[in-house]
């Protein structure tokens, strides 16, 4: 049992090996297995040795699972992604728009995640592009970066961060756009919204329901009872769908800050999990219905894992997508052409910053320094992998590596 606020990685990994996980489907069991084995010998490791002859300390660095649902992974990937996208931002206003779906579709989306998550992306982007094309609003193609979230959003919630399933997309939308290869400035330079919110609600609902009915008629949607689905569509059709639009960002810096909080976010951060006992998990959450006060929730391990599993995304499903002038096809050429008309420098080449350098810059931690003597440098000897049980020797003539292999020989 852990004390409040001192949950360790080992306790979290043990939680992800709970017997109840056997009740989940094969894909979810595989994900839980990855989370359970993260940073353990089961994932393999890098073997290092200090280059100081007076030390010769042997050091093992376990591999991470790298899964996007892992509470320990993704931080450095997030920073690299943010830096790459930041370079592509134009000097214009940016708006934050959230599109969600009525709770009547929750069970349907859980059973058709890949198909209906894509539908959610498509309906939201088509709505924004349709309004942007209208000369009354912009008369150009805007740039959109959309991020899928499955936890209840604060902007649309009277509940809290309780791991409930509520799919929605956060969209960052440019105030300006591109038309005929040139830049069109934002028309709403002082407005608190990009497009009329009430009108977006109507158009978005119509597009979503039209796409949903098309998938249903084509037999692509899996459902135990089609009549239940029809009733859900009918009920949702009478409701006012929630589309939330925030005031424009203050500048590029605030866009970056937003991206850092939302792009690679998991269902819950490990810092919110305050205690794990033999039978329960306790975590903090903000109760938005009570002035965003921070409270404590305790669930059985089975219920916690059930809620956690709700937020697993389909394998290879892309949760961050770009539309409009930010769509991937021909993006660099397109952006550089517009930047030229605006007398801006071309986009810089993509630079992948090594992990060691990023750790030093971001956290002040030199992972190449020997943890034993604090003066020598760690030299990679070989890499061991769990599945093939083979090793890769970076330098065959390296004496340290040869000495270790000799020790390992029978």
Image: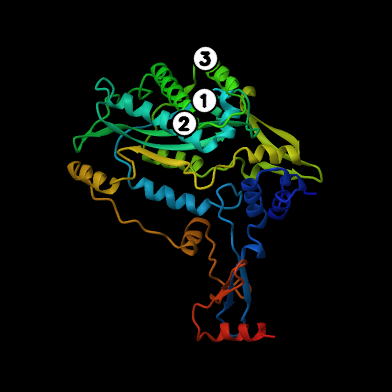
Q: Earlier in the sequence, mark 2 or mark 3?
A: 2
Q: Which residue is mark 1?
A: 101
Up the image or down, 176 lies above or below 24; here it is above
The percent coordinates of residue 279 (x first, y second) are 81, 42
Q: Would residue 96 be visible to someone looking at this image? A: no
Q: Secondary structure at mark 2?
A: helix
The percent coordinates of residue 136 (x first, y second) are 26, 20
Q: Choose between 402 and 176: the one closer to the eye.
A: 402
Q: Choose between 197 and 87: the one closer to the eye.
A: 197
- Asked which colour scheme the image uses, the reply is rainbow
Q: Secondary structure at mark 1?
A: loop
Q: Measuring 45% from the left and 63% from the top, which residue is drawn there?
A: 354
Residues tagged 1 and 2 counted as in contact (Cβ below 8 A)? yes
Q: For label 3, count other residues whose C-alpha is less than 10 Å away and answer few (under 14), some (14-19) or many (20+).
A: few
Up the image or down, 356 lies above or below 225; here it is below
Q: Earlier in the sequence, mark 1 or mark 2?
A: 1
Q: Say which quadrant the C terminus sits in.
A: bottom right
Alpha carbons under labels 1 and 2: distance apart: 8 Å
The percent coordinates of residue 186 (x first, y second) are 27, 29
The percent coordinates of residue 228 (x first, y second) are 60, 21
Q: Measuring 39% from the left and 20% from the top, which residue is drawn there?
A: 203
Q: Which residue is mark 2?
A: 120
Total numbered circles = 3
Q: Secondary structure at mark 3?
A: loop
Q: Measuring 55% from the left and 80% from the top, which residue is drawn there?
A: 51
Up the image or down, 383 lies above or below 135; here it is below
Residue 341 position by quadrant: top left
Q: For label 1, count other residues whose C-alpha is less than 10 Å away and answer few (under 14), some (14-19) or many (20+).
A: many
Q: Which residue is mark 3?
A: 239
């Amino acid at each position: 049992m852990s004390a409040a606020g001192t949950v360790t990685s080992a306790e979290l990994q043990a939680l992800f090996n709970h017997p109840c996980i056997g009740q989940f489907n094969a894909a979810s069991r595989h994900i839980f297995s990855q989370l359970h084995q993260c940073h353990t010998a089961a994932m393999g490791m890098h073997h290092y040795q200090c280059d100081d002859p007076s030390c010769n300390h042997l050091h093992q660095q376990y591999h991470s699972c790298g899964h996007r649902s892992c509470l320990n992974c993704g931080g450095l990937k997030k920073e690299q992604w943010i830096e790459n996208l930041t370079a592509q931002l134009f000097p214009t206003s940016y708006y934050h728009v959230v599109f969600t779906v009525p709770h009547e579709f929750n069970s349907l989306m859980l059973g058709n995640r890949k198909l209906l998550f894509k539908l959610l992306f498509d309906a939201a982007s088509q709505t924004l592009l349709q309004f942007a094309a209208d000369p009354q609003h912009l008369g150009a193609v805007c740039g959109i970066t959309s991020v899928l979230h499955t936890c209840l959003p604060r902007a649309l919630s009277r509940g809290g961060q309780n791991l409930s399933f509520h799919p929605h997309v956060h969209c960052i939308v440019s105030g300006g756009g591109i038309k005929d290869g040139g830049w069109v400035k934002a028309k709403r330079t002082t407005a608190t919204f990009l497009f009329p919110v009430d009108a977006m609600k109507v158009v978005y609902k119509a597009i979503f329901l039209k796409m949903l009915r098309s998938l249903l008629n084509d037999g692509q949607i899996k459902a135990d009872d089609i009549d239940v689905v029809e009733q859900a569509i009918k009920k949702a059709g009478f409701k006012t769908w929630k589309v939330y639009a925030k005031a424009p960002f203050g500048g590029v810096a605030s866009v970056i800050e937003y991206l850092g909080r939302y792009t690679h976010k998991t269902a819950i951060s490990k810092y919110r999990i305050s205690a794990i006992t033999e039978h329960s998990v306790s975590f903090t959450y903000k109760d938005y219905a009570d002035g965003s006060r921070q409270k404590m929730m305790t669930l059985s391990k089975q219920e916690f894992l059930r809620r956690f599993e709700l937020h697993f995304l389909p394998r290879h499903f892309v949760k961050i997508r770009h539309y409009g002038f930010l769509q991937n096809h021909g993006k660099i050429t397109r952006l550089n052409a517009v930047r030229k008309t605006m007398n801006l420098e071309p986009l810089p080449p993509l630079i992948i910053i090594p992990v060691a350098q990023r750790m030093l810059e971001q956290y002040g931690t030199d992972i190449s320094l020997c943890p034993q003597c604090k003066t020598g440098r760690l030299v990679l000897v070989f890499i061991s992998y769990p599945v093939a049980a083979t090793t890769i020797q970076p330098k065959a003539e390296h004496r340290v590596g040869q000495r270790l292999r000799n020790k390992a020989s029978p």
